[in-house]
Amino acid sequence: MPVFLAVDLGAETGRVQRRKRERDRADTASIRSAPRVAIMAATPPTDAELNTMIRARLASLGIDLDQLPAGTTADPATGSPGRDSVLASLRSFVRGSVATLASFQMPAPAGSDPAHAAALSQQPAPMLYPSIGTAWRR
Amino acid sequence: MNRPTEVPAAEPDRATSAFNRRLFLARTAAITAAAAVGAAAAPAAASAWSGRTPKFSDAAYARPRPEALADPTELTVAEAAWMIRYGKLKPAALVEAYVSRIGAYDAVYQAFNTVLADQARAAATAAGRRTPSTPLHGIPLAIKDNYWTQGVRTTANSYLFQDFVPPYDATAVARLKKAGAIVLGKTQMGPLATTRATTPDGRITTVNAWTPGNPATDPGGSSTGTATSVAGRMATSGTGTQTGGSITAPSNAQNLTGLKPTMGRVSLAGIIPLSYTRDHPGPLARDARDAAIMVTAMAGEDPADPRTQGLPEIPDLIGAATPIVSRGRYRVRTKVRVGVLPGYAADPARQAFLAALDKIDGISLADVPFPDQWDLLTGTEFNNVRLPERSEPFMPYLRSDLRGFGVSVTGWLQGALLGAGEFITGQRAKLLLLERVLEQIFAKCDVVVQTSPVPFDILGLPEIGFPIGFTAAGVPIGTILGGAPYEEDRLLSVVGAYQAVTDWHHRRPADPVAPTASARSLMAAGDRGRLTAEDVAEQMQ
């Protein structure tokens, strides 16, 4: 059964993604062995929807963006940005970093049966401190 | 206690908060006033760390170069240690020479936000009464202001810590002091260690010591103040932290040798966190041997930091940084293959650097590839996996005082937006990246040139930044080597040998012209430029 990912990188980051994919074309082994996925693009969220999501997420953590100055003008006393400027930056972050990370799937070993690729991609473990891990694994 | 009397003890309301912030800005420009802060004697040590000082070999002591004898501030740590060991220099005289330079030039450099002149004098006098047992005995150091210092305000150049007086020293500071080093002052840094040094509201403070009249020259961030203090001969050596290049970049920018040890080598206990998995404490020094001396003192297991435990023994770093000389030729103690990444040698300074390396006995060059998916796994988006690590420990501050983050707030909000799933993906990708680095790079070499410090910061691998030349305009050019886990000795061996056959690292910037009254006025008005929140979001490490 194919794995479906709902991915929207957005127009703003598309160029960056294409450039990186071109640079990474040498990864033939790992790309060939990556899980076969069918991309089913969801409807990209609008700015207004992202604003609501961002505000709601932050509010759920107890962070009120209204602590910042209204509009796009920075607070002259602290330099902290206006909340509209921050929202624009956070929208870009969600469309870029969050989407890129969410869409990434670990490659399966080269030569893997494509039918097993998705399952194999689940196997690599996370490592918070990879360099320290080399010592602890000795 | 050593608390600055001009800083209010509490922040009861917004009006008072704004008042405090004005005081902070005023204070960071008032070096002379700050110099008086250290008059009170520090209370007895109450560090979280209480261990033993390592033994140092004789290689840690170097007979001074003739040109360094005339001015104690020109001496490297190893040279000053030799002078002190053999009774040719008193720690008090060394400290006084630095205090004098700070008084003369730091109004221009703005490298320090606190100078502990009287405290340093008292420590130097006490050191003069003891027999030296380490090369750091009586050596004045500049400490980045995110390292806790007992009884001395530690701000990380942030409003959030403007009143923070730590109850004990960071382990790294405690180790250095136990080895006999003297804390001369706390240095300017990017707010919360994000960018080049600025005030919390983004006003540029510290300049590159090589271009003191041009604030636009990149001084490297965020350990800027330490770099400028060491380069400008206002401290013999100093400490920095690197999350995204902040030891190697300022070292490269200011003709210094900065060593970022492998994650866990140096304890992070008592250092204000930016990103738990990425923050690396280390020295900014004048040469490889000084960097080795500093790390030897700073490194080691710490009960307060589990990341330091269960790691390989610390090798003989000082010996590694000291090449063998035979019949006028230098050779490294152990053969080292230096990996060269595609495109690295496009620059003439780098070509000359590689050519010089190739002539050193025991060093060979090897072409190595960028590992698979290098750009993706080390690019902006995967680099941003670090951001929740800064948001999580700051959650109380994010809830109560967003403006307290000043120009740096955006990165903390970004971190709060990244989901747990994406964070886990990033941690899985880090191990994948490390395995590829080990298999595809370090199978062919022992150390490797770097085109950016970020990939090895992601992985927690050691890096060393050091000088390899100057631009036509006289601005330093540096480069970075990266190593395999816990192989700082190999990095030091290459740089130590390179520095034995070159003299870039001995060059010092000219003294700045003392500021006129009008120049002081300009500096007070913040005319060195100002980073906006948008600038910080783009540049932050």
Image (spheres, coloured by chain):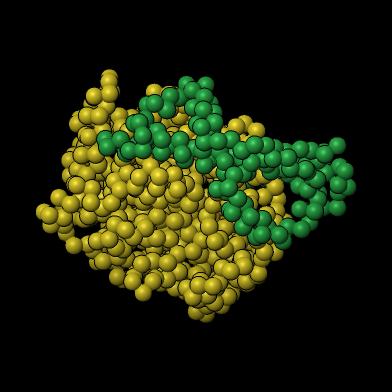
**Quick one: B400 or B442, which is closer to the camera?**
B400
Task: Decide if residue B522 is on the left or right side of residue B147.
Answer: left
- Residue B480, image x and y in percent? 51, 61
Task: Decide if residue B457 is on the left or right side of residue B129.
Answer: right
- The chain in green: A
Task: Decide if residue A44 is on the left or right side of residue B173.
Answer: right
- Residue B20, image x and y in percent? 24, 30
Q: Image quadrant of residue A102?
A: top right
Q: Image quadrant of residue B23?
A: top left
- Residue A111, image x and y in percent? 86, 52
Residue at image x 19%, y 47%? B525
- Residue B347, image x and y in percent? 50, 72
Q: Quadrant of the N terminus of chain B?
A: top left
- Chain B as rendered: colour: yellow
Q: Residue pushed farthest bottom?
A: B327
Question: In this rendering, is residue B121 above or below B89?
Answer: above
Residue at image x 79%, y 38%? A3
Q: Image quadrant of residue B184?
A: top left
- Regarding residue B259, the answer to whether it shows in the image is yes
**Quick one: B98 or A131, which is closer to the camera?**
A131
Question: In this rendering, is residue B69 above or below A33?
Answer: below
Question: In this rendering, is residue B383 above or below B154?
Answer: below
Residue at image x 24%, y 61%? B213
- Regarding residue B175, the answer to whether it shows in the image is no
Task: Decide if residue B427 is on the left or right side of residue B524.
Answer: right
**Quick one: B289 or B342, which is closer to the camera?**
B342
